[in-house]
């Protein structure tokens, strides 16, 4: 059984099915993964730096102590992932056109994160630090915000969220007029848009 760590740099992986032939455990720097299937893979202990995942299926991947630094996920399926299990050092990633339904960022420190055109249904952001994050045109149906730091966070084009201002730090967060019901939903009041 090999114990040495593989170091891979500047490589592109196309149409690989890692659920059948697992990716070698190691460090991946400045690599591109295109149309790859990682479903149910165990990526625990891997290190990814400056990598791009495009059109990949990473649903139900195990991320225990996985290092994700400066990662871009584009057009990916990331259902049911537990990002709170990742290595916390340097944790940084952005998501564009991704489905992250039923995923968890519980207690994660992910300042400045960007979610663009993402599905974030039932996603857990409890006790998360989302300072200066952006939720651009993203669906937050059933997403959990409890004791979450959302200072300066941009929700102006996000939709279907329900955020209780009394149990979250929302200082200087940005919302659109159409998003006001998502801040008042717990009061069970009717907001009419009469001109």
Image: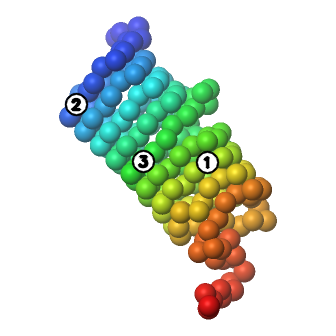
82 above or below 15? Answer: below
Is 177 on the left-hand or right-hand side of 6? right
Q: Nearer the viewer, mark 2 or mark 3?
A: 3
Q: Nearer the viewer, mark 2 or mark 1?
A: 1
Instruction: State if disc 1 and disc 2 touch (CB < 8 Å).
Output: no
Report the coloring of the rendering. rainbow
The residue tagged 2 is 14
Distance of mark 2 from mark 1, alpha carbons? 31 Å
Q: What is the secondary structure assignment of the residue under circle 2?
A: strand
Residue 112 visible in the current orientation: yes
The residue tagged 1 is 133
Q: Earlier in the sequence, mark 3 or mark 1?
A: 3
Q: Quadrant of the N terminus?
A: top left
16 above or below 190? Answer: above
Is 169 on the left-hand or right-hand side of 140? right
Residue 59 visible in the current orientation: no
Distance of mark 2 from mark 3, alpha carbons? 19 Å
Q: Position of residue 144 (x, y in %)?
A: 61, 60
The residue tagged 3 is 96
Distance of mark 3 from mark 1, alpha carbons? 14 Å
Q: What is the secondary structure assignment of the residue under circle 1?
A: loop
Density class for disc 3 (Cα within 10 Å; few <14, some 14-19, many ≥20) is: some
In this rendered view, identify the residue nearer to me: 15 or 66: 15
Q: Quadrant of residue 117?
A: bottom left
């Amino acid at each position: 059984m090999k114990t040495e760590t593989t170091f891979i740099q500047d490589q592109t992986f196309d149409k690989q099915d890692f659920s059948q032939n697992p990716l070698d455990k190691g460090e991946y720097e400045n690599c591109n993964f295109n149309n790859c299937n990682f479903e149910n893979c165990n990526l625990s202990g891997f290190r990814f730096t400056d990598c791009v995942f495009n059109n990949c299926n990473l649903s139900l991947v195990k991320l225990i102590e996985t290092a994700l630094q400066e990662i871009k996920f584009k057009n990916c399926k990331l259902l049911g992932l537990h990002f709170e299990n990742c290595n916390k050092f340097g944790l940084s990633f952005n998501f564009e056109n991704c489905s992250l339904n039923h995923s968890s960022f519980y207690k994660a420190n992910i300042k400045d994160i960007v979610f663009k055109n993402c599905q974030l249904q039932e996603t857990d952001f409890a006790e998360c630090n989302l300072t200066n994050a952006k939720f651009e045109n993203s669906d937050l149906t059933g997403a959990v915000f409890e004791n979450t730091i959302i200072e300066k966070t941009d929700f102006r084009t996000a939709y279907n969220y329900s955020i209780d201002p009394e149990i979250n730090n929302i200082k200087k967060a940005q919302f659109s007029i159409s998003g006001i019901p998502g801040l008042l939903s717990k009061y069970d009041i009717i907001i009419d848009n009469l001109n």
